[in-house]
Amino acid sequence: MTVTLDAPCTPTLPAAPTGSPAAPVDRAVAPLLPVVGGDVAVPLVDGDTVRYANLDYAASSPALEAVAAHLTQALPYYSSVHRGAGFTSQVSTQLYESARRTVADFLGARADDVVVFTRNTTDALNLLANALPGHPGAGDVIFLDSEHHANLLPWQGRAHRCVPVSHTLAGTVERLADALRERPAALVAVTGSSNVTGEILPIARIAAIAHAHGARIVVDAAQLAPHRRIDMTALDVDYVAFSGHKIYAPFGAGALVGRRDWLDEATPYLAGGGAVREVGTERTEWAAAPQRHEGGTPNVLGAATLAAACRAIAALPAGALEAHEGQLRERLVTGLGRLPGVRLLQIWPDSTERIGVVTFVVTGHDSGRVAAYLSAEHGIGVRDGRFCAHPLLTRLGYGDGAIRASLGVGSSSDDVDRLVAAIEQLQVDGEGWDYALDHGRWAPTPDPRPAAPWLAEATGPADATDAAAGASPCGD
Ligand code: PMP
């Protein structure tokens, strides 16, 4: 059930400031931490080669060098977890279980919280949806219509209310409070920061409101965790879900962290070996969480690298992440703001904090085609589309999609400056190549860029249907 509490609001979409005075953005900003592939060269359609400007951290971030080094160190010891008496099995088990402690510490979890390793945030939120108390009167799930699909679809299969965002962030929080006042809920599911605009939500305040009305809160921290310190205890947050591949550990692990009781009582998420205490042919005694939900052989290297990334981020001096990303974001927003016809997406005019995610459209230019142009002619990687947030893009009036540039610890002022210069060149000179739709995606035509030789060796000759099969059906 979807309940609309109020008429949908008209979004506030400020034009990017034009002709604004130069901000202190002329000083070079270097990467904060070394990442694998930070200097990888990519081909352009004109035959040239340039350093890849990765402005797509919000989709998947590169591995930190420290994370890759940890992986290399751990690989020779890779073995079965919880299942072997051999030395390397014991090393692997220790790696896996200590990764839980590292992740719990990284998120400021309470001593009795549980860390369940999952594949990613989507998996973690589906696990929590599976663990919602089902008894009569348990209450439903409340979420905003600005959420990523991962924090929307799992709840659609349960009793739920979708609260439309208001014109302001303060008004949006008030709408959540109104929904809770109207009827108690079991859970408020909210993102830590928008994957479309980077705006950060006031989590502590929403947690206090949820708890005052007897509900729990889960934070979708897929975007927030790589960019801001999260302290579950201080924020009084019940559950956090996040993904390794967005926090510099792209090896297939994520986590759900939080209160034990629902997880201990829930039907096992993934029934299988490792999730049980005793199995009979008719009756099974299940293990408690976290093992209860981790049936099958665990992803020890995913968990270990996720923990290594958490350690590396936690070891940064206080404020370093915010300062690095803040400078680059300001530079990007100021640079784009000087270009006529560039509009930045924003949900709330009163939001004050943002991570390094900037989404925009260029008037008169199809966003997918701009993204193809940036890659083909400038070696810049951005994301285009609706970012798996269809209701939000529709609400903002950009159902046709937009362009997202996102930053991380490996980003530099050179990446940002190249993007701004490329958009300016597009506006002044136009495209320098032809583009056509190929299986629904814009692509240069012809596309003479050679594939990396190692790729052809590994995969055989490229087949156009590979790309088509890999395209997201939701046009994300
Ligand atoms: N929530 C947000 C805010 C996201 O940005 C994403 C990924 N784009 C997800 C959830 C889903 O993360 P994953 O694909 O790692 O499950």
Image (cartoon, rainbow, N blue to C red):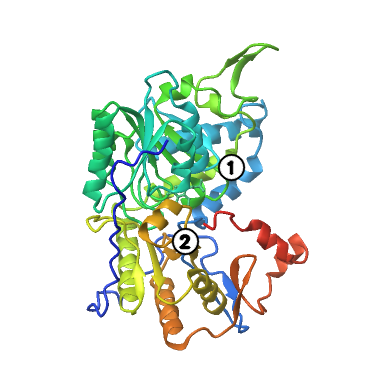
Q: Which residue is mark 1?
A: 301
Q: Is residue 49 left or right of residue 344?
A: right
* Residue 11 percent across, percent down from the top left: 30, 58
Compare residues 467 and 294 and report the one nearer the observer.
467
Quarter of the image with the N terminus is top left
Q: Are marks 2 and 1 in contact (CB under 8 Å)?
A: no
* Residue 73 percent across, percent down from the top left: 59, 47
> Which quadrant would residue 405 be assigned to in this image?
bottom left
* Residue 175 percent across, percent down from the top left: 26, 41
Residue drawn 47% across the image and 47% down it: 149
Residue drawn 66% across the image and 33% down it: 80
Look at label 2 and name its amino acid: Pro
Compare residues 233 and 203 and report the one nearer the observer.
203
Considering only vertical position in the picture, is 400 above or below 69?
A: below
Look at label 1 and name its amino acid: Leu
Considering only vertical position in the picture, is 423 above or below 308?
A: below
Q: Secondary structure at mark 2?
A: loop
Q: Which residue is mark 2?
A: 34
> In 3D space, how far apart are the residues under numbered discs 2 and 1 (Cα atoms)?
20 Å
Q: Secondary structure at mark 1?
A: helix
**Residue 101 in sight here:** yes
Residue drawn 64% across the image and 30% down it: 296
**Residue 218 in sight here:** no
> Which quadrant would residue 461 be assigned to in this image?
bottom right
